[in-house]
Amino acid sequence: MPTKRSPLSEIEEIRRRNPLPTERTWNLGWAAMTQLEAVEACMLDTSEDHPELWKFFVIGLVTSMENAFRLSIQFLIDSGDPYSKRASKLTDFKFRIEDILDMKGKRVSVGALIGHLVSINSIEDIDHHMSVLLSGGDDEFLRILEKARKPDDEVSDIEGWCGPLLENPESVRRFVSQAFKQRHIYVHELCPSDRVIPADVREMFSYGKAFVRATLSLIDQILFPGMTARTQAAMNDGAYRTLSEAKQRMDTAYAALSTKNIDKKRLEAAQKAWERYFEAHMKFSPNPYSGGSASPLFDAPARASLYEQRALTLEHDMSTVEWMETL
């Protein structure tokens, strides 16, 4: 009988594949939005004469939405009360004693664990989780978004009027619900290509983007009260902070390892070789916004990912050296 995997092991595996500092920056929530827009850009460049390809755009849309909401749940819970207390009402997942014991020594926050465990297979799942966290279950999430107002720098053309974060909530419910259902069909069934309607896919993207953007803007207002809406410059600043934190982690790990009784010349040579690899890889790394104002949103996380990978390697080496010292 196959052994059930620990959710903590799953989280660590995800981090090894995508080693970004998820506990320290909310900018990753907006990275999910950037991912969604990148998929949409590919969709708009694809001919309707290839309906089979349009299936994958729906899959990409739902994946981006799922990532955005898992991160939203994580950061709300980790921000403290009242959201952390309300998390006890999210009862659609199971956590075993073995999983609790497995938390020892793991750098996984409560929010990250719950965000990973909750089910997000429909708009009803999203509505339940976000409603519980934001209102204790007293108000529907779409209603919360509809009642929330845009910050001052997102006002409409009518001077002094701030519109709702989410307009047309019923259309959002309809097309986001359709996207989840279609994703399930495209992934699990042999769906004929002639059943893929590009016009519907475009509507799903339009309302899916509006849903995610409104949610992230609301979380911004909650986590950073008084902060104006995220301009490109503000988003870039967040990306640079992520990069700085990742590099600091690598530098700290390297400095700590260099104090040990090891072959420091080989360590230095290895680090210089890694730095050459780093520069070569970044020259290659594709950036769809290269040269534009949004370029840091792709470039900085890519650099941060490499720094985090190197930091993990150095920290593992440090643990090995410390273990050897006990022998």
Image: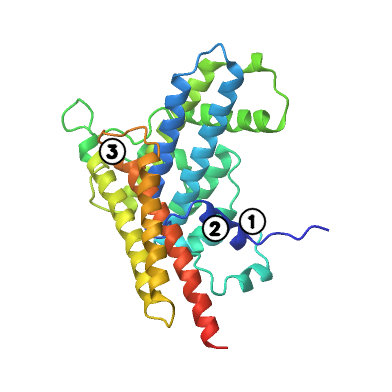
Crowding at mark 3 (Cα within 10 Å: few <14, some 14-19, many 20+): many
Q: Which mark is residue 93?
A: 1
The answer to whether residue 14 is above or below residue 192 is below
Residue beneath label 2, please?
Answer: 114
The mark total stands at: 3
SS for callout 1: loop
Which amino acid lies under the numbered mark 1 shown in the image of this protein?
A: Phe
Task: Work out whether mark 2 precedes mark 1 in sequence or the reverse, and give the earlier one.
Answer: 1
Q: Is residue 195 left or right of residue 173?
A: right
Instruction: Confirm whether residue 11 shows in the render.
Output: yes
SS for callout 2: helix
Task: Work out whether mark 1 precedes mark 3 in sequence or the reverse, and give the earlier one.
Answer: 1
The answer to whether residue 258 is above or below residue 212 is below
Q: Quadrant of the N terminus?
A: bottom right
Quick one: 21 or 207, which is closer to the camera? 21
Q: List x then y, in percent, for residue 288.
A: 37, 32
Q: List x then y, in percent, for residue 323.
A: 54, 82
Do residues under tags 2 and 1 come within 8 Å of each other at their CB atoms?
yes
Q: CA distance from mark 2 to mark 3?
A: 29 Å
Q: Which mark is residue 150?
A: 3
Which amino acid lies under the numbered mark 2 shown in the image of this protein?
A: Ile
Do residues under tags 1 and 3 come within 8 Å of each other at their CB atoms?
no
